[in-house]
């Protein structure tokens, strides 16, 4: 690996969330010290993501199944009366690994950026467009599961209002309710890093 290749890979790692220059450099030098088989495994994994990863047209999470829909949306055992709206794939993954929730999901694609009215990455329109179908299949509750911080609170406020504005009379409040995770999550918490017990308490204490 040439010096330029080392610098290039370090710069790529620095783009990862929460990774600074020092940690990025450690990743690169760890790979240099590792057996060639590990580097080949990393290359194959990255290539696999590029070739196989796709976005579920129903919940918008990324997955690598052969089918268009992800395994959660295809599962007949999931509770269609519950829809949890999360900010990111990482949040969805944490909830799945905690084994505390058995309903359906929708990945919004981020949270509200405070100080601006523009949030182009949020899939608000797609969420609203999916509601008629979800209502037909028994939707009873939408759970807003966002980080316990100002951005998460602003996102929950925005999405709640958008749903209430768009939902025809007769569906809300009689058809389904809109809840948020309880404060089992401490202020400032990210769902991605919450432990299973914390997620369980937040889900059980939703309001």
Image (cartoon, grey):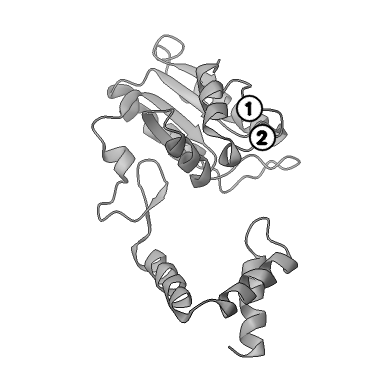
Q: Evaluate whether residue 195 shows in this view.
A: yes
Q: Which mark is residue 185?
A: 1
Q: Position of residue 205 (x, y in %)?
A: 55, 16
Quadrant in the rendering for residue 152: top right
Task: Name which quarter of the figure residue 180 lies in.
Answer: top right
Q: Is residue 80 above or below residue 94?
A: above
Horizontal side of residue 197 vs 154, given as left or right:
left
Number of callouts: 2
When the figure is inspected, residue 117 is found, relative to residue 81, above or below; the finding is below
- Horizontal and vertical percent for residue 97? 44, 39
Question: Marks 2 and 1, Cα distance to the nearest angstrom?
Answer: 6 Å
Given residues 52 and 174, the one toward you in this image is 52
Q: Is residue 166 left or right of residue 135?
A: right
Determine the secondary structure under disc 2.
loop
| Residue that appears at 58% across and 78% down | 33
Circle 1 crowding by C-alpha within 10 Å: few under 14, some 14–19, many from 20: many
Question: Where is the C terminus found, in terms of image quarters?
Answer: top right
Could you tell me which quadrant the N terminus lies in? Answer: bottom right
Q: Residue at x 55, y 43 (%)?
A: 122
Between 138 and 48, the one lying in front of the other is 48
Q: Mark 2–mark 1 contact, CB under 8 Å?
A: yes
Task: Give the farthest residue toward the bottom.
Answer: 2
How crowded pointer 2 is (Cα within 10 Å; few <14, some 14-19, many 20+) is rated as some
Q: Residue at x 47, y 38 (%)?
A: 125
Residue 162, visible in the rendered structure:
no
Mark number, residue 189: 2
Q: Is residue 124 left or right of residue 57?
A: right
Residue at 23% across / 32% down in the picture? 76
Q: Position of residue 11 (x, y in %)?
A: 66, 73
């Amino acid at each position: 690996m040439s010096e330029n290749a080392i610098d290039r890979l370090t710069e790529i790692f620095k783009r990862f969330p929460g990774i600074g220059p020092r940690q990025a450099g450690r990743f690169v030098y760890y790979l240099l010290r590792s057996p060639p088989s590990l580097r080949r495994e990393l290359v194959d994994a990255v290539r696999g993501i590029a070739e196989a990863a796709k976005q579920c047209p129903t919940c918008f999470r990324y997955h690598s199944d052969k089918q268009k829909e992800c395994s959660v949306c295809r599962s007949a055992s999931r509770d269609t009366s519950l829809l949890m709206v999360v900010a990111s794939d990482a949040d969805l993954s944490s909830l799945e690994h905690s084994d505390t929730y058995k309903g359906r999901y929708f990945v919004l694609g981020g949270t509200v950026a405070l100080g601006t009215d523009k949030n182009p990455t949020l899939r608000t329109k797609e969420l609203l467009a999916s509601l008629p179908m979800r209502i037909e299949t028994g939707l009873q509750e939408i759970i807003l599961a966002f980080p316990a911080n100002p951005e998460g609170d602003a996102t929950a406020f925005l999405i709640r209002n958008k749903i209430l504005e768009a939902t025809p009379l007769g569906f809300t409040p009689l058809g389904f309710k809109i809840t948020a995770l309880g404060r089992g999550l401490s202020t400032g918490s990210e769902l991605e890093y919450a432990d299973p017990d914390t997620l369980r308490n937040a889900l059980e204490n939703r309001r």
